[in-house]
Amino acid sequence: MAIDGADKDEGTENSMFRILVVEDDKELNRQVCSYLGHNGYEAVGCLTANDAFNTLYNDLYDLIISDIMMPGMDGFDFARTVRENNREIPILFMTARDDFAAKRQGFQLGVDDYMVKPVDLEELLLRVGALLRRAGIARSHRLEVGSVVLDMDERSCTMDGEEISLTVREFNILFKLLSYPKKTFTRAQLMDEFWDADSSSTLRTVDVYMTKLREKFSGCSDFAIQTVRGLGYKAVIL
């Protein structure tokens, strides 16, 4: 179950940044999303780790705030799995666990910051800003894979300094695949995200776009787009 954040102030400098809040306390989740939303971020809340994975696979996020003690998969396993797929996204634990063992385990798993409940929302906001700056996300939405550079803000792509002409949809698909290397996306997932619901395109249209991307990056030795038989596609860093 996802909880949408409050309408954000489009005039703030933070408005491009998307934050995923994983917290099983529905009211606290709503409060955090609302506060972040009113301070310029786009915040989406999930009540379980499994819901969070579905959300992460369907969209791009800049930072994750997660509880530890949740039904089903706990925050430790959630953070471990996220780190296996994405080493860069900042993760902040927001938890009632105040023991050193929990903090140590969290940081060893790759968590970037740790706050003990009850949290001060103003302090949370400051820590979120610091984590984004530290990650370099506050400067630009960029992906660098070897000689290939994708700039989300400019919707531009270069390889060895030479611009590669991509349509908006080609760019978005490639940015998605390279943001989660080795993660398989089904044709249906890609269709749901990058085509309108009323589109007459079929799942085979995804295959056409993958063929186009492979042709445009045929000389690239930094990554490959692989077909996962019977499922879909994934990007592999070479």
Image (cartoon, grey):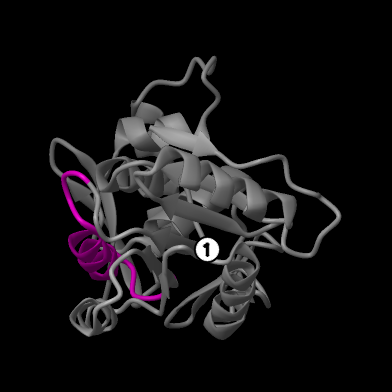
- Residue 83 versus residue 59 in the image, above or below: below
Residue segment shown in magenta: 71-89
Residue at the (59%, 54%) spot, across then down: 166
x 22%, y 48%: residue: 227
Question: Is 68 left or right of 222, judged from the image as shown?
Answer: left
**Quadrant in which the C terminus appears:** bottom left
Using the rendered image of the protein, determine whether residue 156 is visible from the camera's viewpoint. Answer: yes
Taking the spot 39% from the left edge, 38% from the top edge, the residue there is: 190
- Image coordinates of residue 101 in percent, x first then y, are 18, 82
Q: Which residue is mark 1?
A: 62
Q: In this orientation, does residue 58 appear? A: no
- Relative to 223, 45 lies left or right: right
Nearer to me, 95 or 195? 95
Q: Which quarter shows the N terminus?
A: top left
The answer to whether residue 3 is above or below residue 31 is: above
Magenta stretch containing residue 82, yes or no? yes
- Toward the left, the furthest residue is 229
